[in-house]
Image (spheres, rainbow, N blue to C red):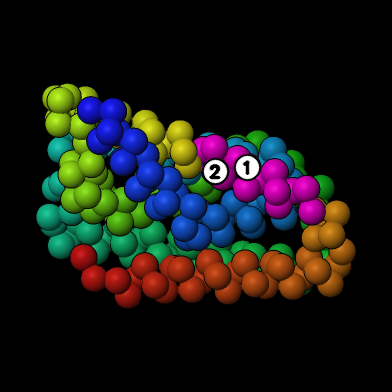
Amino acid sequence: MWTQTLIAVGVLGLLTVVPGPDMAVVTKRAIASGRAAALRTAAGITTGLLVWGLFTVVGLAAILAASAEAYFVVKILGAAYLVFLGLQALWQSRRAAPRTAELKVAGSGQAYVTGLTTNVLNPKIAVFYTGMLPTLAPHDLPTAAGLGLLVVLHATLTLMWLGCYSYLVCGARSVFERPRVRRLLDRVTAVVLIGFGMRVAAQAN
């Protein structure tokens, strides 16, 4: 059991650190609103994983993964949301510095909702959890318990990684807040988010 669990942790760890929409969203929030908002975004992303994990254990994720129509709807909604975040970052790049109102809104829960929505509208998690996760689950445990254990491990690794990443980005925020650097980063983040959105929309089931 422990050998299988360690292998699973290694695989999940590698998948966690690969750059994707989650890191782009956290980067956007860290640059725009600071460390606390970035950590709330990371918490929302982690909650999204737990939601999909729950769906997987009760079998709903398998239904989504097997239904072309349901998968398409969630995929398009997720892609549209990423493009929306990208366009929002592009619009924010028109001003040199963040407004106080933006910081206040981010602190009121918007950052958490952004992270949560990003992952809840990501059908690839359903495919991964129903397709690959069962092969990594310890065979000595009941199926539901094994899947639940790996989901919690994945969520923990994700929270730790994105939390550390948030601190790294915010540690250099004094540089990012320079008007020219801030505009450039906002635009780069916008392009990345829009690119991820278009990629999600173009992916097949």
Which amino acid type is marked by label 1? Answer: Cys
Verify whether residue 146 appears in magenta.
no
Q: Which residues are magenta?
A: 159-172
Q: Is residue 52 above or below residue 178?
A: above
Q: Position of residue 97 (x, y in %)?
A: 83, 60
What residue lies at 64% left-to-right and 57% top-to-bottom?
28
> Marks 1 and 2: CB-CB under 8 Å?
yes
Q: Nearer the viewer, residue 52 or 19?
A: 19
Residue occupied by mark 1: 164
Q: Nearer the viewer, residue 124 or 107?
A: 124
Q: Quadrant of residue 59?
A: top left
Left or right relative to 89: residue 7: left
Q: Position of residue 190 (x, y in %)?
A: 60, 69
Q: Position of residue 24 (x, y in %)?
A: 56, 59
What residue lies at 39% left-to-right and 59% top-to-bottom?
78
Q: Is residue 28 above or below residue 55?
A: below
Left or right relative to 158: residue 63: left
Q: Residues within 10 Å of mark 1 (few under 14, many from 20)?
A: few
Q: Position of residue 119 (x, y in %)?
A: 41, 49
Which amino acid type is marked by label 2? Answer: Trp
Q: For the residues marked 1 and 2, what is the alpha-carbon distance in whole angstroms? A: 5 Å
Q: Nearer the viewer, residue 36 or 103?
A: 36
Quarter in which the N terminus is drawn: top left
Q: Is residue 51 visible?
A: no
Residue occupied by mark 2: 161
Q: Is residue 89 above or below residue 52?
A: below
Q: Secondary structure at mark 2?
A: helix
Q: Which mark is residue 1?
A: none
